[in-house]
Image (cartoon, helix red, strand yellow):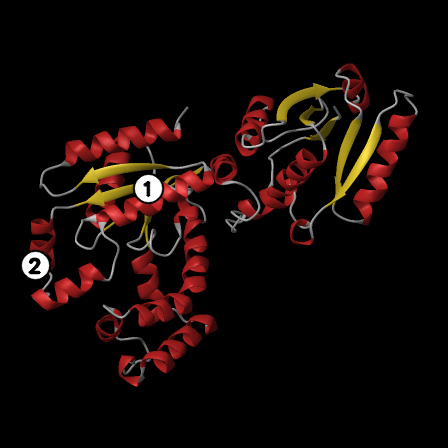
Amino acid sequence: MVKAIYAFSGDPITYGHMDIVERASKAFDEVIVGIGVNPKKNYMFTLAERTEMANKALGKYLNVTVDSFEGLLVSYAYEKKIGVIVKGVRGPTDVEYESLLHQIGETQKLGIDTHVLFARPHLTHVSSSNVKAIQSEHGLIHEFVPLDVKQRLEERISKQYVLGVTGEIGAGKSYVSKKLVELGTTKGIEVHNIELDHIGHQIITDLKEPRYITVREEIMQTFGPETRNSDGSINRKMLGELIFNNTDAREKLNKIMGKPLLVRYQKELYRKEGLILLNAALIAETGMSYLCNNNVALVNVSKDVQRERLEGRGHSPEQIERRIVCQHSYLQKRDCFVDAIKKDNHGQIFEFDNSNKGNDDEIDDMLENIISQFGMGT
């Protein structure tokens, strides 16, 4: 039986590390992932945190175990009767460095060999330092690290805890979000409500940057000149009538608006700390739950109250029906989140029924649960 060790600091573990581990697990009977301890190095995460992240990320590999070590890697391998050290290299600089380490290891005359695995092309840019640098500017890192790691980086670097707030139309997402902000203030916790619908409204009406002018032009070209107001903005009511109950039209609009919305959302995150509410109706439908790490407050409402609220907005029975059927139902949204949590091995759903008025105490209970589950203030 051939045992191998793959060592790295894991501050934090990335998909690049995980790919090397997966390939090593197929090449060797047993693989030890060694999380290194260097007293001279300043780590962002403690050894316990780095080990925990690695264990969660690598749990599906039955012949892989995670351990920590201090000192020379070859000495650790010798004591554990490990015959091979696995090295992952991304480019010429890594090759030169790892070759030097191998030669140093050879001077110890312990009979430990080196097995080199070259990073896959789509992962050569992935490193722990790059991930931390991108997160410091609120960039997208979900393709670099698992969501568990992404959430920890957001908390550690940006001091942000992101929660999606979503539900069917008329469920009262904005009301619940507003109350969470108010209740957070009474607890001394900053809560910020970022409404994607509001961001979308800015994009199609008054943002002056060239990109958003182009977005409005593309919407007019796609959906017709009747969607244009005299000032060059988009007529939201007209656009809404065109896309509701038209799946193809909604997909076209989502494609046009997707990247602009993400860029503006990232800008909204700047200089905000505490609980970040990503308030959006279509988190489940558009596969955006990675933005909130599959952590969502899912707001429910009875059908009678839902229709009553939509009637109060001046919608006709036909308009109400069209708006309801064009979105996932509460259960469909929930199923999407359950599947995402299972796939990513991370996330949780905070379910809340917002059918009744005067439910501040229930919203407060949910906020207390969110604070506890996120470990805020600990």
Q: Secondary structure at mark 1?
A: strand
Q: What residue would you read off at disc 2?
A: 312
Q: Which badge, 2 or 1, comes first in the chain's sequence?
A: 1
Which residue in the rendered view is the most extreme toward the top? 79
- Residue 135 versus residue 272: which sits nearer the camera? 135
Under mark 1, the amino acid is: Val
Position of 47 with respect to 116 (left or right) is: left
Element class at badge 2: helix
Relative to residue 223, is residue 303 drawn left or right? Answer: left
Q: Quadrant of residue 75?
A: top right
Mark 1 surroundings: few (<14), some (14-19) or many (≥20) residues within 10 A: many
**Label number found at residue 296:** 1
> Which x, y percent locates residue 316?
8, 67
Is 277 situated above or below 242? above
State which quadrant residue 327 falls in. bottom left
Q: Position of residue 187 (x, y in %)?
A: 28, 30
Q: CA distance from mark 2 to mark 1?
A: 27 Å
Q: Amino acid at mark 2?
A: Gly
Residue at image x 66%, y 34%? 25
The reply to whether residue 161 is visible in this rendering is: no
Q: Quadrant of the C terminus?
A: top left
